[in-house]
Amino acid sequence: MFSQIFSLLLDLVAGILTGGFLLRLYMQYLRIPLSARFGNPLGRFVLALTDWLVLPLRRLFPFVGGLDTACLVAIYALQCSMFGLLWLLAGVGGSFASVLVLAAFGVIHTAVTGMTGIVIIYAVLSWVPGRTVMTDLMDRLVTPPLTPIRRVLPLLGGMDLSPLVLLVLLQIIAIVLAHLQPTVLMAL
């Protein structure tokens, strides 16, 4: 029972932190300002959640070609730490290489789950009349993955179904990952 509770709490904390780091990385990639002076409340939250690890890591891992490598290292290190603790809790069964592979799958799973949440929030906010800072922010976050879908899928009766298609694609990716993970782990 203790191990299940610990596993749940560890997964929750690591998921929130990893999601925050992934969101920071994605917002930086899209060149969305994170600071408070631009009126971005989500950016302020992301900075507060991630600065404690990104800023020290940035001394060792600078930006490379516009990519925040310190953020990437933090994301993978968090997932490795989580799966490493679970590996130790389970009694060190299997090889440590499985921890590294599980961490990579954990990063991808968190990214898919995070994008799913962002698309759902975007869809709900699109039903609310008026523009807010959050509506504009969500629009900027989902526009890159929706653009190729919108090129192929026209409006149907004035309805944009591209968020629904993206949600289905994200679920397919999640299913493929869930089936691929045990196969990769067995190969180790």
Image (spheres, rainbow, N blue to C red):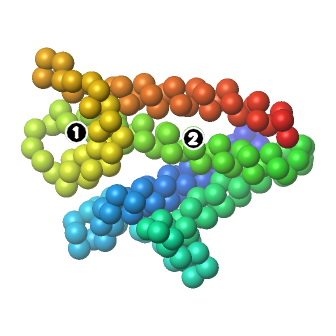
- Amino acid type at mark 1: Leu
Give the residue at the far bottom of this rendering. Answer: 59
Q: Judge from the rendering whether residue 83 lies leftward or rightward of residue 143; answer left or right.
A: right
Q: Judge from the rendering whether residue 142 lies leftward or rightward of residue 114; answer left or right.
A: left
Name the residue carrying label 1: 125
Circle 1 Cα neighbour tier, 10 Å, few/some/many (<14 / 14–19 / ≥20): some
Identify the residue at image location x=60%, y=28%.
176
Residue 5, above or below 124:
below
Toward the viewer: 30 or 5? 30
For the C terminus, give its image quadrant. Answer: top right
Give the image quarter of residue 143.
top left
Q: Position of residue 51 (x, y in %)?
A: 48, 72
Identify the residue at image location x=43%, y=68%.
66
Could you tell which of marks 2 and 1 lies nearer the N-terminus?
Answer: 2
Give the image quarter of residue 43.
bottom left
Name the residue carrying label 2: 109
Q: Secondary structure at mark 1?
A: helix
Toward the viewer: 139 or 93? 139
For the N terminus, give its image quadrant. Answer: top right
Kindly tell me whether residue 52 is visible in this rendering.
Answer: no
Identify the residue at image location x=55%, y=67%.
69
Of badges 2 and 1, the one in the foreground is 2
Q: Judge from the rendering whether residue 171 lies leftward or rightward of residue 141; answer left or right.
A: right
Q: Position of residue 53 (x, y in %)?
A: 56, 71
Give the residue at the far left of this rendering. Answer: 130
Kindly tell me whether residue 141 is visible in this rendering.
Answer: yes
Toward the viewer: 150 or 114? 150
- Amino acid type at mark 2: His
Identify the residue at image location x=53%, y=76%.
62
Q: Position of residue 65 (x, y in %)?
A: 47, 69
Residue 80 is labelled as none
